[in-house]
Amino acid sequence: MINKIKMEKKANAILSKNEIIVQGSNYARLLLKKGFGEIYEEFIYLSSYETLFLLEKNKINLLNRYEKEITAEQFFKIMIRKNPDFPLNYLVFKDLRNKDYVVKAGVKYGALFRVYEKGILPGKEHARWIVIPVKADGKLVFEDILGKNRIANSTRKSMLLAFVDNDNTITYLELKWRRM
């Protein structure tokens, strides 16, 4: 059993209705140290974006409740059925994680994601940005952006609009609140 723990290369995660739960292991704790997941009681919960990212990097095995393996492609299709904006949002998540930022849910700040400076983990310092993915040819409502930027400012964050164009190139626009 000790050898098995030392040889462990991946964590096992279970897709259970609307949650992705990582089974306790040394590797699962390593994922937490790298900014993935949230711990609640003895379980580690991953977001759908974290799950797909880790599947694509071959860092986790994802199983359904019958212990059948779910591939990254299968999981992506499941997520698109649940959220048609998942591909756009995931592109932004993946881009930021590939640049070594820690990306977490930003719902309570009025955004899809909150992002931490490189090398900073949640709980050590506050996130620096809230991020809103936007289709480059999509519409923005000025009042919505103004309100979200106000929330960002009141929580000491800046807002990033992540514009994704038709060839999946992402351009970030940082907005800050300024007193006049």
Image: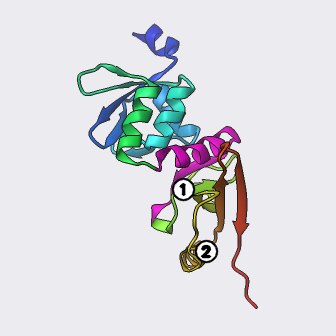
Seen in the picture, residue 161 relative to 34 is either above or below; the reply is below
Residue labelled with disc 1: 113
Classify residue 155 by image quadrant.
bottom right
Q: Nearer the viewer, residue 124 or 37?
A: 37
Which of the labelled discs sits on residue 149, or is there none?
2
Q: Which residues are magenta?
A: 85-107
Q: Please, what secondary structure does the residue beneath circle 2 have?
A: helix
Q: Does 2 appear above or below 88?
A: above
State left or right for residue 41 relative to residue 168: left
Q: Are marks 1 and 2 in contact (CB under 8 Å)?
A: no
Asked which quadrant contains residue 100, the reply is: top right
Can you tell which quarter of the image residue 146 is in? bottom right
171 lies above or below 98 = below
**Identity of the residue drawn at 47% across and 50% down:** 85
Q: Position of residue 77 (x, y in %)?
A: 40, 34
Quadrant occupied by the C terminus: bottom right
Q: Residues within 10 Å of mark 1 (few under 14, many from 20)?
A: many
Q: Secondary structure at mark 1?
A: strand
The answer to whether residue 119 is above or below residue 112 is: above
| Label 2 Cα crowd, 10 Å radius (few <14 / some 14-19 / many 20+) | many
Disc 2 marks a residue whose amino acid type is: Asn
Quadrant of image for the N terminus: top left
Q: CA distance from mark 1 to mark 2?
A: 13 Å
Q: Does the magenta portion include 73?
A: no
Tell me if residue 82 can be seen: yes
